[in-house]
Every structure is written in structure tokens, then in C-alpha cells.
Image: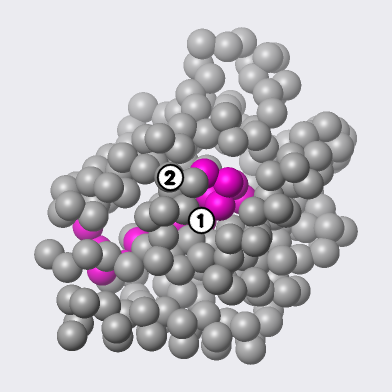
Amino acid sequence: MASPLIIGVAGGSGSGKTTVVNYICEQFGTENLLRLEHDSYYRDLKHIPFEERVKQNFDHPSSLETELMIRHIQALMEGYEVEIPKYDFSNHIRMDESIPAVPTDVILIDGILIFTEQDLLDLMDVKIFVDTDDDVRLLRRLRRDIEERGRTVNGVLDQYEKFVRPMHLEFVEPSKRYADIIIPRGGQNTVALEMVSALINNKMSFSPDNQ
């Protein structure tokens, strides 16, 4: 099997990564692409009472089992199937069932902290950072966490002030220097998306397996 093209999409919480990821998925088709979300690899907190779970800093790199994600990507690169964890964001625990994943031509990794891990960076062929104003990102995070993850307004704002903003400044924002392409104004930047498409197609065309 040919070595897959590995694409990383990073950016702050609420930056519009999903729009960019969906665009790339449309370019290749879901049958040719596997999406791995860093969020799926949050560490299991079943051993901690719920009242303590909600106090954890989920925006620090240590909250994620990145070493397992790296092992999964390496296995996929070698042609093996893997079992991707499923995470319950309402209860902050890893679910009993997992998602089977098979090797594909393109592996897309997305998450706010994927550029902070050197071993993960070393696996990526294309690195994209989605850059969006802080106020826009906060509004999007509010809407997502309330509608999709059962959080309260006060809970989201408290978490943002304590963890999200300081971790963004310490880890996420500095990591964009590793990007091959930075997309300003999020996923609505059609010119930047066209650049992304051209770069990926160029990488695919000049892959040793395609020569």
C-alpha cells in the first residue's frame, strides 16, 4: 500500500477548523480519507468523581493521550486497522465502544493542540492553521458547548477564562509558526481554501508513489 498523505489542521477553539476539514473531505471523498480528531483521544477520567472532572484543564496538552494517536497513525501508515476511542464530552469519560478505522490514501488530523507535539508534527506532510479573531471564536464555542455538549453559559465562560484563553496564548497561538498555510478569518476564506487545495494536489502529484 502507498504511504498516505497526512494533513494536519490546527487552530484555536471555534476558529472554523471544521469548515476547512469539511472542504478537504469534499476534495478527496470520504472513501479516500480518514479523519482523526485529537478530541477523541482525551484521557479517560472515569476514576475521578464528576465534580472533579469538570474542574480539569482540558486545553492543556497533557489532557490528551497523544501517544496513542501517534501509535494509531503509525499503524495506519503500515496498513493496519485501528480502533479509535469515542469520548463522552458531557461526562468527560471515554465510552466503552470504539470506532474501527482502516488505512486510506489521506489521513486528516485536526485539533487545537496537534502542532504542539513534535512527534505528531513529524508525521504530517501538510500543516494548516486556521486563524480567527478571539471574540468570534468565543461566540462559536459558547454556541457549540451549550447546544452540543450540554454546558451552561456560566460554565463555558468560566472554563474559557480559567483555561481556554491562557492555554491558547501559551500553546495554540505560538504553534502556528509550524504551519505551511495560515488561513485568516477562518473557513470562509475561499482564496486560502483554493491555496490549500493546490498545495495538497501538488503534494499528491509529486508523491514518490505517483511517479
Start-end of magenta stretch: 102-117
Tell me if residue 144 can be seen.
no
Residue denoted by label 2: 119
- Name which residue lies at 62% across and 83% down: 192
Please identify the quadrant where the N terminus is shown: bottom left
Amino acid, disc 2: Asp
Looking at the image, is 1 positioned above or below residue 58? below
Tell me if residue 49 can be seen.
yes
Amino acid, disc 1: Asp
Q: SS of the residue at dot 1?
A: strand
- Asked whether the residues under the numbered discs 2 and 1 touch, taking CB atoms below 8 Å apart as contact, a structural biologist would say no
Marks 2 and 1, how far apart at CA: 15 Å
**Percent from the top left, x then y, of residue 141?**
74, 51
**Percent from the top left, x then y, of residue 65?**
46, 32
**Percent from the top left, x then y, of residue 166?**
80, 39
Q: Is residue 193 left or right of residue 3?
A: right
Find residue 70 and name its label: none
Residue denoted by label 1: 110
* Residue 107 lies within the magenta run: yes
* Residue 132 lies within the magenta run: no
Q: Which of 174 and 109 is in front in this view?
A: 174
Q: SS of the residue at dot 2?
A: helix
